[in-house]
């Protein structure tokens, strides 16, 4: 796998989620992200090849493309009159990026859990179902649900990057 493919695989989903939060349409978000990667890969003279630079470049390019897309929508007058839109400040942009990265990391870890644990963890923490609702849907005991949720949370906390731990509380509310 080449460096471009590795970079694409590492950030594509996160960037699509980030773009989707701006434009609200997954297909548009995917197009904008793909355009950002194409532009980045065509750039021959990059001043910095560090991962931090590439990540920041891609998120900034996607943000710019999203805002440009929003501004040029033909129906923007009608749209903006129905909602209270404000261009996000740098702090909220950064929080949005962090939220996207944490969510991507959580889904990566969940995908590594055993199937039963994964299913119960998603239902309990991501879908917000109660333990009783899970037992009724899956026809398993309440103890099984509790055990699998605890097992999943333990795996998540063990594998999650330490800098993401403070955000996990807000994410899984």
Image: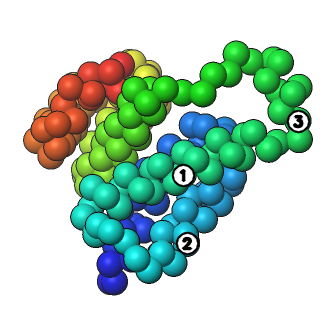
Q: Residue at x 83, y 33 (%)?
A: 76
Q: In this view, does 67 lie to the left or right of 125?
A: right
- Give the percent coordinates (x, y) of residue 22: 61, 37
Q: In this view, does 54 lie above or below 86?
A: below
For disc 2, the neighbor class at 10 Å (few under 14, some 14 to 19, many from 20) is few
The residue that label 2 is drawn on is: 38
Asked if the residues shown at circle 2 and circle 1 are in contact, with their CB atoms under 8 angstroms apart, the answer is no
The residue that label 1 is drawn on is: 62
- Give the percent coordinates (x, y) of residue 146: 23, 25
In the figure, residue 165 lies in which quadrant?
Answer: top left
Secondary structure of the residue carrying tag 1 is helix
Q: Is residue 166 above or below residue 163?
A: above
Q: How many labels does the image show?
A: 3
Lower sequence index among marks 2 and 3: 2
Asked if the residues shown at circle 2 and circle 3 are in contact, with their CB atoms under 8 angstroms apart, the answer is no
For the residues marked 3 and 1, what is the alpha-carbon distance in whole angstroms? 21 Å
Q: In this view, does 22 lie to the left or right of 55?
A: right
Determine if residue 68 is in view.
Answer: yes
Lower sequence index among marks 2 and 1: 2
For disc 1, the neighbor class at 10 Å (few under 14, some 14 to 19, many from 20) is many
Determine if residue 111 is in view.
Answer: no
Q: Which residue is drawn at 42% across and 56% down?
A: 57
The residue that label 3 is drawn on is: 75
For the residues marked 2 and 3, what is the alpha-carbon distance in whole angstroms? 28 Å
Asked if the residues shown at circle 3 and circle 1 are in contact, with their CB atoms under 8 angstroms apart, the answer is no
Secondary structure of the residue carrying tag 3 is loop
Lower sequence index among marks 3 and 1: 1
Q: Is residue 32 left or right of residue 151?
A: right
Secondary structure of the residue carrying tag 2 is helix
């Amino acid at each position: 796998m080449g460096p471009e493919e590795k970079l694409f695989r590492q950030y594509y989903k996160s960037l699509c989620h980030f773009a989707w939060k701006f434009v609200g349409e997954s297909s548009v978000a995917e197009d904008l992200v793909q355009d950002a990667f194409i532009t980045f890969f065509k750039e021959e003279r990059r001043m910095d090849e560090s991962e931090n630079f590439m990540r920041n470049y891609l998120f900034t390019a996607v943000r710019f493309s999203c805002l440009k897309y929003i501004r040029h929508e033909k129906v923007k007058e009608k749209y903006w009159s129905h909602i209270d839109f404000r261009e996000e400040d740098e702090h909220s942009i950064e929080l949005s990026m962090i939220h996207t990265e944490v969510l991507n990391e959580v889904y990566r870890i969940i995908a590594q859990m055993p199937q039963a644990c994964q299913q119960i963890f998603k239902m309990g923490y991501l879908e917000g179902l109660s333990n009783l609702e899970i037992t009724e849907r899956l026809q398993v005991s309440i103890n099984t649900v509790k055990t699998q949720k605890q097992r999943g949370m333990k795996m998540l906390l063990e594998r999650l990057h330490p800098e993401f731990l403070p955000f996990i509380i807000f994410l899984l509310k």
